[in-house]
Amino acid sequence: MTPREAALRIVHDVAKYVARTARNLKSGVALDAELVAMLARDLYELGAKRERASIVLDELAVPIADPSTNGRADGPPACWSMLDAQLSNARSELRVARALLAEADALEAPLRAGDARAVERGAAIAVEVERRLRALAREVP
Amino acid sequence: MKPKLLIVDDGDRYVELAHRFLRDYAYATRCELDGPCWTCERRAGCTLTHAHDAREAADALERHPDVDVVLLDVAFELDEARLVPAAGDLERRRRLQGLDILAQLRRARGELPVVLMTSEEELRYEDAAEALAVDEFVTLAGADAFDARALGLLVERVLARRRDAPAAGGYLWGRTASMARVRRDALTLSRTSLPVLLLGETGTGKSALAEHVLARRGPFVSVDLSAIPPTLVAAELFGTARGAFSGAVERAGRFERAHGGTLLLDEIGSLPPEAQRMLLLALEEKQVTRLGENTPRPVDVKLVAATNADLQAAVRAGTFRADLLARLNPAARIVLPPLRERLADLEELLGAFVQRTFASGADRALLAAYLDAAKLAGPPHAELALGRAPPPPSRGVAFAIAPATIAALRAHAWPGNVRELGLLAASAAVFALADALRAVEEGRAPSGQAARTIPIPAKLVRDLVAGSWESAAVKTRGAAADVEAGATLRQVAQELERKLYAALYKECGGDFTAMAKRLLHGNASSNARRVRLRFNQLGLRIRESRKG
C-alpha cells in the first residue's frame, strides 16, 4: 500500500467513523445511555474486528509512519528523501492523533460508565482526531 | 403519513446514526433486532430500512415499493461478488460503488429521490453523480459535515421538491395570470382545514390539484360520484353495517377511510338528494353513521369537492341543496381555466408531459431499450426541444417538435383540456420513439450524439389531434372560434355540431339519406328523418346551407 492509499483508507476507516456520534452532539447537553454506547463504539469498537480506533490507525498508518514500507523498492534513492520530506507534516499530524487516541483509551472505563467529564472529553477527542486525520490525508502526496 | 427512507450503506454505523437522529422527525424508530432490517416484518411504525449492497437495495425496494427517499453511500468495502458487475479496477469500483448503484436505481425507479452521502474526499465525484441526476448531496463526515439532525429537514426539502416536479406527477402550474391566481388560492387553502370547491371543465386538472396541492398529510381518498349508481352512493360514502340491506356486509365508507386525511368528491353535482343530506350532516357534525347503525363515528376529513356543473343553476333547479353548497365554501372556490384560455402554457405543459411519460413504467423501459440499441450511455431521460434540428441534449434524448406543429396545436380547441394534451404528448413521444427504435434496429438511424434527438413528425401530431376528441370533419379551434367568449362547453359543442351538419349537407348535395349513412348506423330512411330533425334543431336552413 502506498502512503496515499494508506491515507485514503485512514480517512475512510477511521476519520469517517471515529467522530460519527461526537460531531452530532449538542454541547452542554447530557448524553443518554444510547448515545454514550454509540460514542464508545466509535472510539473502542471500530471496523469489522471491533478494535480500538488507536489500533486500527496504527495498522493503517504503517506506510506513512515507517519509511521502510512505503514503496521505496519502486523508486531511485533520490525519490526516497523527497517522499520522506513530503511526509513529515503528515507524520506530525499522525503523532498528535495517536496521542489523542491514547488519551481516549485511558478514558474507556469511566466513559463506558457514563461519567460526564469522561464522555465530554472523549467526544472532544473524537472530533479532534477526525480533524487531524483529514489534515494528514491532505499532506500525503 | 411518515416518509419511508431506505439507507444503502455497506456498514451499519450510519444506519444507527439515522435511527438515532431521525427519530426526532418521526422517520424511524429504534429497533434492537438483528439482521438487515429489509428482511424484517416486525417493525411496526418503523419507516427506515437499509440495505448493504445493490442486490439488497433492489430486494428492499421490491419489498417496500412505497419508499420515498434513498440515502446512498458512495464507497462500499465489499467482496467483488457483491459489487455491481462492471469492468475496471476493483479498488476504484469499491470507491465508486454508490454511483453504480445509483445508475441501477435510476434505470429501475427513475422517479425515486436519491440523496448521496458523501465525505469531503468523495465530493470530487459529484460531476459523475450529477449526470445520474442525484437529488441532493449530504456530507456526513469531515469539516463541513452535515448535522445528522438536519437530515430530517433535508429529506423534507427533497420530498417537497420532488412533489412539485412535473416529471414526478407534481402539479403543472404554468405561467399564465389565471393559473397564478389558482396557485395563490390553492396554496393558501392547502394550509387550512376548510372545505374546498373546485370548478372547471373536464380535464382541467381538478383531481390533480386536489391530490398534489390541496390534500393534507394522511390518506387521500377519491370518489367519482358520477360513476356510482345513485342507490349505492350513500353506502359507498358512509359505510354499511351487516344486514343494513340485502347482502350488506360490515364495511367502512370512504369518509372513514379518509380519516386523518383528505376526501375528494369528484362530480359533486351528481350526488343524490338523500346522500346530500347525509353529507351535510357529516360536514356539520364531523361524524358519520354507517347505514344500518345508530352510533355515529367521528371523522376528521378535509373535504375537496369538484365539479364541471353549474351548482348555482342546480340549486335554482332544486337538484342541489343550497345549504350544502353554502357548506362547501363557495366563496373561496377555485376555478380552473380551460386550456384554450392558457395557451401560453402549452409548450411548458408539453415538455412536462414528455418528461413524465418516460419517468417510470413501460415507457421508461422502451426509452432504455432505445438508448441501449443506439449505444447511448446514461440513464433514461427525456425532454422536449423546440425546432426542426435542435442541438442534442447532454443526457438522455430530446424529442424535437417543429414550431409549425406547435402552432397547429395552438389552433386546436382542446375540449379535453390538459388531460387531452397530456395523452397527446405521451402518444406522440412514444410513437416517435418506437419508430426511432425500429430505425436503429434496422440500421437506418443516425448514430452517435445525433441519435439523442428524435423528431416528432408533424403528420403524427395531426393524426393524433384528428383522432383525439371530435369527429374528423370539425376539429380545429377555428370552428369554435365563432362562438362568443364565455360560451359554455355545451354551446361550443353545439356550434361544432352545426358546422359538421352544414359541411356534410353541402358534401352530400342536400341528400339527408346520404348524410344519415355517414352519421348513423341502422335504417337509412328513419335515420334520415332524425338527421333532418336535428338539422332543423341546429338552426340550419336548407337554402342557406346549400349556399355554403
Image (cartoon, grey):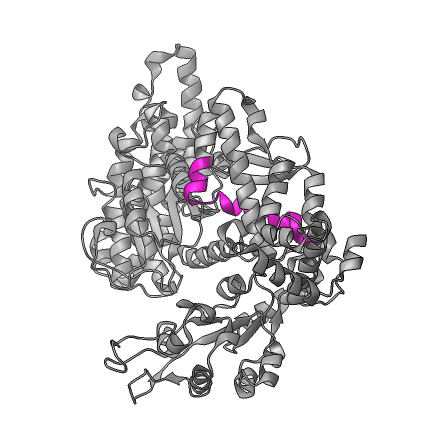
Residue located farthest toward the bottom when viewing the structure as drawn: B294
Horizontally, residue A67 falls left or right of residue B317, namely left
Q: Nearer the viewer, residue B327 or B170?
A: B327
Kindly indicate the quadrant of the structure image that contains residue A46.
top left
- Magenta: main secondary structure equals helix
Counting from the top left corner in percent of width and height, residue B475 is at 66, 51
Does residue B430 show up?
yes
Counting from the top left corner in percent of width and height, residue A62 is at 29, 28
Residue located farthest toward the top when viewing the structure as drawn: A76
Residue drawn 42% across and 14% down?
A: A79
Counting from the top left corner in percent of width and height, residue B381 is at 51, 38
Does residue B376 show up?
no
* Residue A18 inside the magenta-drawn segment: no
Counting from the top left corner in percent of width and height, residue B406 is at 68, 43
Q: Count of labels shown?
A: 0
Residue drawn 32% across and 43% down?
A: B9
In the image, which residues are magenta?
B343-366
Kindly indicate the quadrant of the structure image that contains residue B1.
bottom left
Give the answer, above or below, for where B178 lies relative to B88: below
* Residue B353 inside the magenta-drawn segment: yes
Q: Nearer the viewer, residue B124 or B154?
A: B154
Kindly indicate the quadrant of the structure image that contains residue B446.
top right
Residue located farthest toward the front when viewing the structure as drawn: B525
